[in-house]
Image (cartoon, helix red, strand yellow):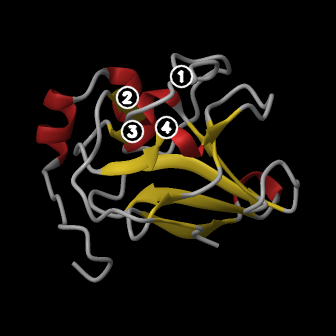
Amino acid sequence: MASGVPRVEKSDQEWRSQLSKEEYRVLRNKGTEPTNGEYDKFYPKKGYFVCRGCQTPLYSAAAKFASGCGWPAFDKCYAGAVKTHVDNSFGMRRVEIVCAACDGHLGHVFEGERFTETNERHCVNSVSVRYVEGEPDPGLTEAKVV
């Protein structure tokens, strides 16, 4: 619980029984879904997005923005909800983002594109998150991760 987010640990069999094949491929095997997923062009005024694997709140609806990249984009996450790892696959350096609670693969974070004031774009797979109407538990604050 170093990040302040309670850890969620499940066996591979538990993950497979809970997630669809595509959700499992992306969240547990670090896959990437095709562009224009369920939440790419979805811009709710209120609510928040949780990890589809463990239901941990990750992003507010207010943090979502139109980047034109083909995947949902957020400029900040709830403090402590997302961890980063350097990803050197495919002959390039990227920064992978994962759920701090269950290590589910969310996507990658990019800096320096100047889309928003935070200068950070979390490029997230739609199948990695789920939208929830309403407000998360009070006390969650938003922060940059890089």
SS assignment at label 4 = helix
The residue at the point 78 percent across, 31 percent down is 69
The residue at 25%/68% (across/down) is: 5
Q: CA distance from mark 4 to mark 1?
A: 11 Å
Specify the label residue 48 is tagged with: 3
Query: Closer to the N terminus: mark 4 or mark 3?
Result: 3
Q: CA distance from mark 2 to mark 4?
A: 8 Å
Q: Residue 76: which quarter of the image?
A: bottom right
Q: Secondary structure at mark 2?
A: strand
Q: Circle 1 is placed at which residue position?
A: 39
Q: Are marks 4 and 3 in contact (CB under 8 Å)?
A: yes
Amino acid on which disc 1 is placed: Tyr
1 and 2 marks in contact (CB < 8 Å): yes
Work out how far the residue at label 3 is from the one at label 2, CA to CA, in angstroms.
Answer: 6 Å
Mark 2 highlights which residue? 131
Q: Specify which label sits upstream in the sequence, 3 or 1.
A: 1
**What is the CA distance from the residue labelled 4 to the residue labelled 3?**
5 Å
In primary-sequence order, the first of circles 4 and 1 is 1
Q: Secondary structure at mark 1?
A: loop
Crowding around mark 3 (Cα neighbors within 10 Å: few <14, some 14 to 19, many 20+) is: many
Give the amino acid type for the residue marked by disc 3 in the picture. Answer: Tyr
Residue at 27% across / 57% down in the picture?
102
Q: Residues within 10 Å of mark 4 (few under 14, many from 20)?
A: many
Give the secondary structure at mark 3: strand
Q: Which residue is mark 4?
A: 61
Mark 2 touching mark 4, by CB under 8 A?
yes
Identify whether 138 is placed above or below 50.
Answer: below
Q: Quadrant of the N terminus?
A: bottom left
Q: Nearer the viewer, mark 4 or mark 1?
A: 4
